[in-house]
Every structure is written in structure tokens, then in C-alpha cells.
Amino acid sequence: MSKHPIILTQGSFAHKDALLFPYEERGIQFGDGVYEVIRIYEGNPYLMEEHIDRLYRSLAAIRIQINLDKATLIQLLLDLIERNNMSVDGLIYLQVTRGSAVRTHTFPDDVEPNLFAYVESQPRHLDKLENGVHTITLPDERWANCYIKSLNLLPNVLAKQTAAENNCYESILHRDGTVTECGSSNIYLVKDGNIYTHPTTNHILNGCVRMATKRFADNLQIPFIEEAFSLDDINGADEIFLTSSMSEVLPVTQVDGNKVANGEPGLITRQLQEAYYQDAKIEGSKQISR
Ligand SMILES: Cc1ncc(COP(=O)(O)O)c(C=O)c1O
């Protein structure tokens, strides 16, 4: 039984057991929809506006229109947190699909999008934030429009599963040797004091924490160079880290079984973690539990 049983469905609130979709639902049958995962710290959402802006960009990209403006949706999500008395660390999962209709590939006429959102508790990865994580490299087998936060996550699911089966936290994805991003995070390489990361083309999701990280780097006057790096560059990296709403700024200490530099989280990664904690108004990674 969830401690947070109230969900947002279309524009109103209900108990989660009341949320029933027919089997002919475009998200279920085609993955015809988009989603967001928003971090909550002690009941407060982090980077909410960035997530909602991206949701509307994803919706526009797949030509779904919802009858809610951004401000109303944000207020509904804040109400969702409040109605669930959510005061711990957690997340908001928000999904919009094209709707429920008789199965046909083309867009159905007069279909109403299905929107739902729920909150769930989710502790921070304190141990990983402190000590770093291991990763493996895999070919990026996704489609050409990864900037859309689409429900179609099968390549990501398979990549993350392969990582897990190899005792790794993340899969570093590459297209013909060019590193794009990870199964569910963005990735960065530090060399000679510069941060390198894939530019925001169609081949990556423009992460909300990536946007924040760019801001932190600018404030810290650390060059943030939006140029892709290659698998070969990883061998000579001074630091590697990844970012996402659930992973924050996470040091990568091993790639494919090889240590990154001396195998310890690097100094620039630590500076960016500090900037993140200040921005999100949370404490650092050494804290035991909350
Ligand atoms: C493929 C992919 N890239 C990057 C990210 C990071 O995005 P954000 O920082 O908005 O959480 C995610 C998050 O889930 C993701 O799935």
C-alpha cells in the first residue's frame, strides 16, 4: 500500500485504485506519449519549471495538445504533493499519452489525451554520490529523436539491464564511438580543467540537471564545452560524471572495468555536487539518512 495514494488524473485528484485505463490505450499499445520524472526534496520539487517546459516541448514534438496551461499544471502538481502529505525525498512521475481509442496507427479523431501523475518516496543515492559508480559502454540503439522524452524506453531498459547484469549502475551509450549520453542520464568528461559533453542535438535528452550543471559550471568559471567526446577519450579522462534528476551529479569511477584516472571522484565533480546541493537547498552526500 503506497503511503502516497492520491493521484492526479486528467485535471482532478483520485485514489490511485480508481485509475483504470482501457487496454486500448495509446501509451500501452504504441508507447504514444511522453513523461517526466521530477525530483522532490523533503516535499519540495526541484527544477519544476524546467521539467514542465520540457514536457510541453515533448508534447509539441509528437503533436499532442493538452487543455492545461503550464502554470495550472504546476499548481496541480504542487497540490498533488500536498494532498499526499509528501514531506520526504521522492519524485513526481507525470505521463501524458495521446489517449484511449480503438487501435489504429494513425492519430484517432477527437481523442482526449490521458494525463496522470503520482508521487513516490525515493531516498537519495548517498553512498553512490560519495563513492562514485561503475559503468559499461554499449552501442546507442535508440531512434533519431532522443530529445523527446518518449515513453518508448525499450533500448534504455535493455541497456540498463545489461549494465545491472555487469554490476554497473549505468550504461554509457555511443553512436559509432561517439558518446551520446547514458541509459537514463547525461554524461560529461573532464580533461585539463574543461568539461566536455554532447551538444543538445536530437541524439540526446536535454536533461534538466544538465541545464543546471551548465549554469553551475558558468558560475564556477569552469569551461563547459558542448562537444561530443569519443570512447577513446575516456581512457585519458581526468574525471567522468553523470547527471539526472534521480542521480544528481554522480561521479563515475570505472568504465568497462578500468579506473577513471585514479579511481576516485574528481575535484570538479565535487565542486559541481556542492553547487547542486546549494541550488537544491539540500545537504551533501555524506549525510547518513533523512
Ligand atoms: C536518456 C536520458 N538522458 C538524460 C536524462 C536526465 O534528465 P534529467 O536531468 O532531466 O533528469 C534522463 C532522465 O531520465 C534520461 O532518461
Image (spheres, rainbow, N blue to C red):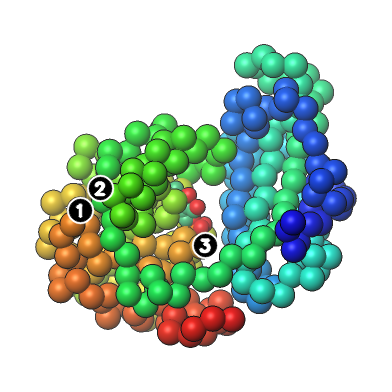
Number of numbered callouts drawn: 3
Q: Is mark 3 within 8 Å of ligand 1?
A: yes
Q: In the image, residue 17 lies at what x, y percent? A: 82, 46
Q: Is residue 159 above or below residue 98?
A: below
Q: Is mark 2 within 8 Å of ligand 1?
A: no
Is residue 171 visible in this depiction of the protein? no
Residue 48 figure quarter: bottom right
Which label was assigned to residue 137?
A: 2
Q: Is residue 167 above or below residue 31?
A: below
Q: Earlier in the sequence, mark 3 or mark 2?
A: 2
Q: Give the spatial CA distance, label 3 vs label 1.
A: 24 Å
| Horizontal side of residue 170 vs 126, given as left or right | left
Quadrant location of the N terminus in the rendered image: bottom right
Q: Which is nearer the eye, 53 or 252? A: 252
Q: Earlier in the sequence, mark 3 or mark 1?
A: 3
Question: What residue does disc 3 label?
Answer: 245
| Horizontal side of residue 7 vs 243, given as left or right | right
Q: Which is nearer the eye, 79 or 161? A: 161
- Please report the residue visible at 63 percent of the width from the left and 62 percent of the height from the top: 91
Label 3 SS: loop
Q: Residues within 10 Å of mark 3 (few under 14, many from 20)?
A: many
Question: What residue does disc 1 label?
Answer: 256
Q: In the image, residue 77 lies at what x, y percent? A: 76, 60
Residue 61 figure quarter: top right
Q: Residues within 10 Å of mark 2 (few under 14, many from 20)?
A: some
| Horizontal side of residue 171 vs 255, given as left or right | right
